[in-house]
Image (spheres, coloured by chain):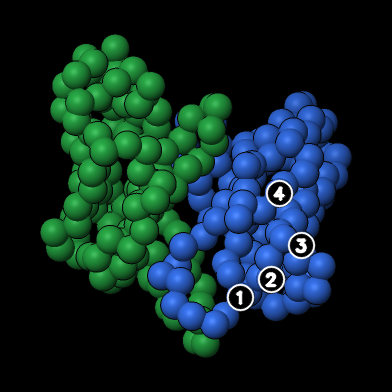
Chain colours: A green, B blue
Amino acid sequence: DAGVIQSPRHEVTEMGQEVTLRCKPISGHNSLFWYRQTMMRGLELLIYFNNNVPIDDSGMPEDRFSAKMPNASFSTLKIQPSEPRDSAVYFCASSLAISPGGLAKNIQYFGAGTRLSVL
Amino acid sequence: QQPVQSPQAVILREGEDAVINCSSSKALYSVHWYRQKHGEAPVFLMILLKGGEQKGHEKISASFNEKKQQSSLYLTASQLSYSGTYFCGTFPNAGGTSYGKLTFGQGTILTVHP
């Protein structure tokens, strides 16, 4: 299995530009999570999907951030317009979420991340 | 609600032991431990599903006290390769669908020196 694949690995852009981060989850997984990591704020959950449906986007910092999951094998996180304070490492993770009552392991597998620098 | 990890940072010499704690104010169904090496993604280490159960990974083991709502990670005879940030992730008590969302602690930075 190739694992969770994120692209690009590095992105350098200028303030005001649109940025699109991409994620391919592990085949068969039904939950997908977008995280942002910075030194100051640690690992923050931005949004997560289950069966391609957004469940909770309360972690999305502003309307400038949006995420989609058009099918089970692809998700995007878009920032428009980007600002210097958006500079961070963005991780995508996927898991096979099983409802409590069963053997709920819900192990999350992380992609390698996208390091975003907004100048 | 975010679980609280302690200590925030640990510095060891090779061969020394360390304990990292993870406490929650809410009842827990399971606790997950992840390790993130510098410049890399977090990687799953182990999961604790039952109260008092211990799991092991290399010379790293963990316990889960369901009654106290806390878990501890034990690193014995530490190696240089153990350096990194350790995160606990908690999963709420069974009772509804939670879609696999883990709530991660703030992380504990472990540094092992030769």
The chain holding disc 3 is: B
Q: Determine whether label 3 and label 2 are within 8 Å by CB.
A: no
Q: Which mark is residue B27?
A: 2
Residue type at mark 3 is: Gln
Looking at the picture, how far across and down is residue B70, in whole percent? 76, 62
The chain holding disc 2 is: B
Report the Cα–Cα distance between label 3 and label 2.
9 Å
Report the Cα–Cα distance between label 4 and label 1.
17 Å
Residue under pointer 1: B93
Nearer to us in this view, A9 or B66: B66
Report the Cα–Cα distance between label 3 and label 1.
13 Å
Residue type at mark 1 is: Asn
Residue under pointer 4: B4
Q: Quadrant of the C terminus of chain B?
A: top right
Looking at the picture, how far across and down is residue B91, in whole percent? 57, 67
Residue B45: tell me if it is visible.
no
Is A88 situated left or right of B113 in this image? left
The image shows residue B11, relative to residue A105, as above or below, that is above
Please tell me which of labels 3 and 2 falls first in the chain.
Answer: 2
Q: Nearer the viewer, mark 3 or mark 2?
A: 2
- Quadrant position of residue B36: top right
Report the Cα–Cα distance between label 4 and label 3.
9 Å
Residue type at mark 2 is: Ala
Helix, strand or loop at disc 2?
loop
Residue type at mark 4 is: Val
- Residue at (57% x, 51% y) in the render: B104
Is B97 situated left or right of A21 in this image? right
